[in-house]
Image (tube, helix red, strand yellow):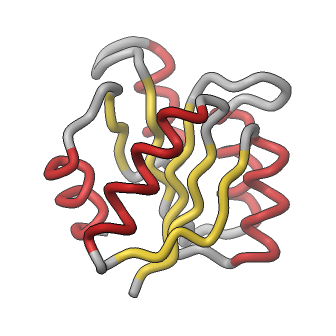
Amino acid sequence: MKKVLIVDDSISVARQLDKILSESGEFQVVGHGKNGMEAIRMHQTEHPDIICMDMNMPGMDGLTALRTLVALDKNIKVVMVTSLGGVGDKFTEALRLGARTVISKPFEADNVLKILREL
């Protein structure tokens, strides 16, 4: 079972992701963070296989956290979650920095599971 860390300042999005992953029986949610600093801290304590992280959060945003996480662990698997869609500078920057892919909000359960299974 793959361990997943969910990092999103939106409680409703975090709950939706948690429900999708938990109900699949393939993923174990090992924690929830609300910003990039929590993502970094929880990566070091929970050792998730995958991090699903929002791009835009208060405090430390997802792109800043991604830079740090990749520097700490070159093999890290981060899926960025955004409402920006599949275009734009932030989308491109996330992939350049090391995100495995970007999922657009709102998302469908089947799409999320397919992407995480491929990782």
Residue 107, quarter of picture:
top left
Q: Nearer the viewer, residue 68 or 60?
A: 60
Q: Position of residue 104 (x, y in %)?
A: 32, 28
Residue 51, quarter of picture:
bottom right
Q: Nearer the viewer, residue 108 or 69?
A: 108
Q: Position of residue 96 (x, y in %)?
A: 48, 38
Is residue 113 found left or right of 28 in the rendered image?
left
Instruction: Please give the name of the residue rendered at 77% of the width and 64% of the height, measured from the top-left corner.
Output: 42
Q: Quadrant of the C terminus?
A: bottom left
Q: Nearer the viewer, residue 70 or 25?
A: 25
Q: Position of residue 102 (x, y in %)?
A: 36, 38
Instruction: Please give the name of the residue rendered at 84% of the width and 61% of the height, measured from the top-left corner.
Output: 41
Instruction: Please give the name of the residue rendered at 39% of the width and 12% of the height, measured from the top-left corner.
Output: 88
Residue 72 higher or lower than 105, as above or below:
below
Is residue 111 found left or right of 93 in the rendered image?
left
Q: Position of residue 109 (x, y in %)?
A: 21, 48
Residue 108 higher or lower than 61, as above or below:
below
Q: Quadrant of the N terminus?
A: bottom left
Furthest toward the bottom, the residue is 1
Instruction: Please give the name of the residue rendered at 46% of the width and 14% of the height, measured from the top-left corner.
Output: 89
